Image: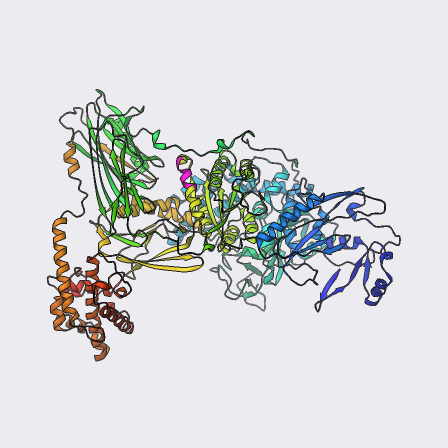
Amino acid sequence: TKRKKNKKIICTHIILDNDATLSSDELSAVQEYHISIANIDFLWDCLKQGELLSIENYKCNESSGLTLLPFERSSSSSKNYCLYFRFCTEDDDITYIPQDFEVAKYSILEKVRTLISNMYNCFNIFCLIIFQLILKASISSTRRHLSRKNTSEDASEYYESYVEELKKQGFLASESFPPEANLLASEKLQALMLEDVLNGDTISEEVSNLVELIWVEALGHLENILLKTANSISLNDVSKAEGILLQVKAALNKGETTEELRKMMSEFYRLIPHRNSEDEVNKRLLSKKEDLCQLIRDVINVSEANLSRSNPPSLAKYRALRCKIEHVDENTREFFKVKEEVLQKNSGKNLVDILNIYRIGKVHETVEFQSKLGNVQSLLHGTPGRNIVGILSRGLLLPKRLVEDHGIERTDFGNLGNGIYFSDSLSTGNKYSQPNKTNGTRFLVVCDVALGCCINLLKRDSSLTEPPPGYDSVHGIRRTEQIISDFEDDEFVIYKTSQVKMKYLVNFCMSGDRIKDFCPCVNSELEENRPELLNDNSQLKDFALPDTNPFINIKAGLQDLSGIQVPLEEIHIKGRIMDFIAQIIVFQAYNNKSDLPIETKYVFPLDDKAAVCGFEAFINGKHIIAEVKEKEEAHQEYREAISQGHGAYLMDQDSPGVFTVSIGNLPPQAKVLIKITYITELSFHHGLIFSLNDQKHITLGLIFLLSFKLSFENDFILHTLDNSTLDSKGFSLQIHIGEVYLPRMWVEKHPNKESEACMLVFHPDFSTALPEKAYTNEVIICLDCSNSMEGSILLQAKQIALHALSLVQEKQKVNIIKFGTSYTELFSYPKYSTSNPDLTEFIMSATPTMGNTDFWKTLRFLNLLYPSQGMRSILLLSDGHIQNKSLTLQIVKRNVRHTRLFTCGIGSTANRHILRTLSQYGAGAFEYFNTKSKYSWKKQIEDQMTRIFSPGCSSVSVKWQQLNLNSPEPMQAPTQIQALFNNDRLLVYGFIPHCTQAILNALIQEREFQTMVSTTELQKTTGTMLHKLTARAIIRDYEDGILHEDETKHEMKKQILKSLIIKLSKENSIITQFTSFVAVEKRDSNISSDSNNPNILELITTEDIDFLPYMDWEVEQLENIMMKVNEILILIFFLILQEGFWKLNHELGLILKLNVNDLNTFLVQKGIQSLGSKGKEDVLQLIATFLVLQLIRIKLELEGITVKSLLKLDDSADYRYALDFASVKKAVEWVRRTEAQYPSLCSRLELGKDWDSATKQLLGIQPISTRSPLHKVFNYNQG
């Protein structure tokens, strides 16, 4: 063994089999430097005990024979291994292994040799770790092999070729190390090799008994509480239940009534059925239910690795924990050392008996442990036995912040806030280690805790969520006779899971505990319980995605319950298009030619961008308007009306894209006119808008009468294309928009109430703006093969993966990775192999048998070998039930500069929240593949692959510029905006009052990007279309978006927003999962079907969609206004002073029709005199100049030129020819300088919210509000 001293390597021990092997010079050196000599057993025993032993019992043999290693003595043949280590150093003289490197890859190869005469056996272990330096070492000899590579691609290629070379030499790949060889590996590699221990074929009897004990404790606790098994509860329901607990906590703090609290908890009990529910809702109950949810989650996650078997064998349960557990023999020094360490920290009076000690370790803890913080202490963590399954399977977690005072015997949130608590005293840990129900013993976890810089506190602080600045942990000092403190015991708290590493699990009992025998029926043999797989003869065509139009097989229109269609006689369509959105009204006239009444339904296909917002029916002289009501109420009304013989109409969304209207009893020989109103976002592709396409309605060949009318509202040039058609096959309209890539903003004022809805349109074009490195260079398809993907879910994932593979371009490198608890890659590194059949076969061979969903391991290895050029894009296909979510998100976030993550959610129980969050963190995009809309899968994966191959911007956010500082928080959808890619379109909606500007922020190639969007007069409108689309966007964001990054808080927000969603649904007639359309028509027994048929043309004529009803008059008026403005500007430019400003004098007032005297009087009343004579003069000149600039802006906007603000009149070349540009530029510069000297002056003088609105009101462009102070002064006709 050697130690490093003053940059020299000092030898302290020599390991030999006999001293005859030393030369005379070496013997002299041994005597001179007092070097100890020992045999090979000394080395193994030192490593086993973890300390340097005395050499007295390890003398070298005097014979010349060679002593075998302990595990070789009974073998006639041996395995030769070689070790390859990778270092972070360039000093060839240093041969020790540094501990600050990361292991990216390793392979194990072995070769069996036969004993030959005097040759001795040895182990040579190959472990290849990609970094910069490779060391080859063996027990019998040591030699170094250096290979420095500059890029991950070169290192990976070298890695693969070297492995192939070794295989040619007779080495074979091995799945695991022999236990003794682990000691030759670095600590980093040993951490990764924990997986090999977990995948072993046997476990000891002691470990088997422990696994059975903690499993029985967990399940037994749940069986006593739950009405059904934990495995029958979905993880999504657990998340929803945790969200409800957060909601109840907030309501409890607000002092809500007992009845309201019980109503909230009833939803919790619906999701998590209990044998007995508790009536009293308090903090103690919330804490218990929080722990219950965590335990259910742990059991479900552990059960995933066992294919949800009710009683898997011990070995399967052990593997599912994903934690190395080794029993420490009570006769070893290690046992006594740990026992002594635990007992010496017992400050209580109760006697403690240590029954068993288990050595434990988790891969992610070892990899992430922040030992570099220093001050690593061995501390204790007590917990009930029912929690051990969860702690061993996922590690110690930060508690969810439900309550500040749990009201039970634990300190979480009570003393030092939201952290993981430890103690250095066994008596403190006893308070939390309750006796097990099964055998009466207790558990305690011994951990290494990296306290780092620890602050000592004497006062409680339950608000802490992190240490004070400059510290890594917190220590609550216990009170003594000399120390006045709030803490009864010493408490150490950390706020990051990466600061703890579990070492031992101690099973003990205290005096007074009633110990019971526990004799589990141990079955350690692993049964084969593989899910049914596809036939091995499956062909590639069996995995093809559906390619049919779903509307071909759907019978659209009015039909009876057996599907026989009622004749359609007339159809009339009216629509209004504004930018990328539209409102369409469809009138359809049907005639029941039967002599009998029939109960009918109306099927109305629409794409996923559309939403019905109105349903009316005209029948028997009556006009029935459907109302949106809560679903249960609506269905009840419909059933009662039908049973009483009345007409009834019920409308639900049966599946994506299909709306069904139950018409109820249709009288004989009766005509019915159905009016459906829907709103939609228009499809867009390469500058073209598509509206009312894909033949969504019935074929028009048998219709007697058809009419169509559209109005357009846009501030850009529109062109209809030759491909637009209107014939018997249907209607198709294609529109080309000019300047589509310019950001723009629309504001709609509601006609009947004080409400404004906004829409922000952003359509980036990155094709010419970004460097080559912004484009994807390699694509990694990651296929989830965990056990939860069994059945049709994995088949669907394969279908999507194969179609994605077919879309990979030739210039892209590609690789396929199958992952679960571990991972398997097709190639050692991505290759140009799109036509390689191995790719297809590798995907088709996937089976859902790889355990849990530990995606973080795959990400970690990929990100250690990130591409040297371009971007890497990962396509993840999974159900989203990912282990170690926080660690996974951390890895994604810190590697986003070179790796983007695109996620695909598969299966009805997919966790869409975590998949969407992963794509958000990874600057990618998320798509959910709904089995009810398989027809769209091809387009969805094609959209994903298009994004993968294009540059984009991430961290997109919108800041709405509200004029009133006291305005409510903007209600925006989507709340979290996913990354944008070339030719992607972003529509952001919001209910934001008095807002005419918004700032869009984003990151492009790690650089901040910002643009301001303003609303011109042409983009302000009145109506309800944008209000309805905004409501629909908020509803859709509620259903599919991310309301909060934390899943529990996301579910809590959903519970809180449910009433708002129902309110928006009713106000805007948008049906949701909670609401339906319903209408009831009261009928008499004597119904005349002839005289009361509706006059269809008359009804249609009343629906007017023209938003400019007096266009001819308005055009003439517009021309007159432009002429007057030009004349006024000619006069005004004669008054400009050399410095670039105008004076607020009588001449300017006459031109602008402004009473300057009244304005001066108003300003004096508002305190302008306080500015002094110089200040007053500057402000009057500033007001005058702003008035002129506003008039110039109005002139430009009348000519179709958009100006973002009054101070942006000088930054565009589009209108320099139209004005005295030099004078305008000088005026703008003067205003900027002067306004900076008098900040916020406009509002201080009560002229208005800002200079833009104030000058418009003074010029008469906008009416002065009756609440404005200006109204009393300028109460005259403006114009």
Q: Main secondary structure of the magenta part?
A: helix
Of residue 811 and residue 906, the one placed in the foreground of this image is: 811
Q: Quadrant of residue 613?
A: top left
Residue 887, x across and y down, in percent = 53, 52
Residue 201, x across and y down, in percent = 67, 39
Is any atom of residue 296 visible in this view?
yes
> Any magenta on residue 397?
no
Instruction: Give the extent of the magenta segment.
Output: 935-941
1054 relative to 846, above or below = below
Task: Classify the position of the C terminus by image quarter.
Answer: bottom left
Q: Is residue 1124 left or right of residue 727?
A: left
| Residue at 21% from the left image edge and 74% from the top image edge | 1168
Residue 193, x across and y down, in percent = 65, 48
966 relative to 804, above or below = below
Is any atom of residue 514 visible in this view?
no
605 relative to 289, above or below = above
Q: Is residue 572 left or right of residue 799?
A: left
Task: Classify the position of the N terminus by image quarter.
Answer: bottom right
20 relative to 929, above or below = below
In this view, the residue farthest toward the top is 595
In this view, the residue farthest toward the right is 63
